Image (spheres, helix red, strand yellow):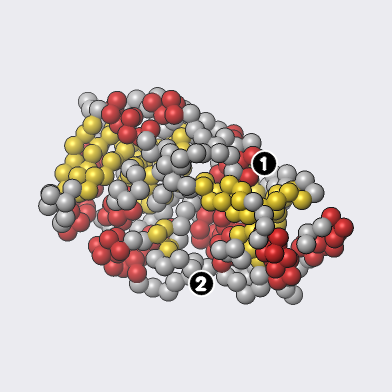
Amino acid sequence: AWRPAHRARIRQTTLAPAVNREPERSSYTFGPVTVDVESHLPEASPFLRECLMPAVACGPFGSGELVVRATLSQTLVERAERRAATAPPLPCFALERRLVMLPGWQEDGATVVFDGGRGCVYRIDARQIEVIGRPGEPPVATGLMRIVREVLTVRRLAREALLDLHAAAFEVDGRAVLIAGPKYAGKTTLLCYAASAGQARIIANDRVFVEAGRRPASVFGVPTLVSVRPATLQWFPQLGQGARSPMLTTAGALTLSQLAKRLGAAQVGSAPLAAVVFPEIDDRADGWTLDTVTAAEGAHRLAACQFGAGVVAPEPTVFGMRYNASATIDGHAIHGVPPGLRFVRCRLGKRAYERDAAEWLQALVSASAPRS
């Protein structure tokens, strides 16, 4: 299984068309990073664009600094699955509270990883990544999206001084508002509330990059899938309506584009930062209240919202090690918040979302307006 003696045959098989069709080729650009994608997976390109845009720009193939190639091979996936049964777990993807560990091994200078949940294999080397999936398995497209997004994000973090934050974001009146807080703080529900007012454009649901060196600071959405929890669905039942993508096998999962469309909202990839909102669920209250907090307290709260802060023992992922991305962000940098940035506490009672969303949005704009 995966012996060096079989290397030439394996390479020829993995890069050969798996179906009788020309591969689809595009490039994806996120800030200073561009990745080329060549795919033999049916419907993969439309799914990639839906998941990644508008935060990531799509362009013609050939301008990328590395290539992600996706194809299908039942034989190679089964072979890797057998090897994975005895392979050690490797840190592959950093989430907000944990590292995703997948079985992997080294082969001819490359790292090979088996993703059983998506039925595919990733072969990672310096200039290209191969995504090999089983024919007829829609989740393979999700694996391809995961790889493209991971490469774009880790390479951008390696090149720019960015704050990597666990936060939702929307734009109103040409300025971005972050919704920052720990898991289950109500970020997605509050984002939906803001978007339902008809005046806000969605930037991100779960993760953002902030380029604090600019004045004003710039917010860039990081594409993620949205897990719609029952509490959010209770207030916004339209999120559960409409056809589900066959690429998404997790119950309640939507792309950010699907979330925006079902709320009747538009999207935007980035915007200048004006304010940060910290939601707090208060079951003893009835509606919502807004009050400003000091810059010192806001910076302290925001520091706790660094992406990956919940990981007990952070370590570099296979992508971070391969592409020179740091596993952690300097916590001191976040205290240098841009001048004029406003911080707002939003207490949410049991019936908060019954009040008019436009009223909340106007109150937030007023509370976060710069002091004269």
Q: Residue at x 70, y 51 (%)?
A: 105
Q: Is residue 58 left or right of residue 13?
A: left
Q: Position of residue 334 (x, y in %)?
A: 41, 29
What residue did someone put label 1 on? 322
**Relative to residue 109, is residue 60 depicted above or below?**
below
Q: Residue at x 46, y 40 (%)?
A: 312
Q: Position of residue 46 (x, y in %)?
A: 56, 65
- The quarter of the picture where the C terminus appears is top left
**Relative to residue 177, is residue 53 depicted above or below?**
below
Q: Residue at x 59, y 54 (%)?
A: 102
Q: What kind of element bears circle 1?
A: helix
Q: What kind of element bears circle 2?
A: loop
- Residue 174's tag is none
Q: Is residue 358 left or right of residue 177?
A: left
What residue did someone put label 2 on? 246
- The quarter of the picture where the N terminus appears is bottom right
Q: Amino acid at mark 1?
A: Arg
Q: Amino acid at mark 2?
A: Pro
Nearest the viewer among 324 and 352 is: 324
Q: Is residue 248 left or right of residue 136?
A: left
- Upstream in sequence: badge 2 or badge 1: 2
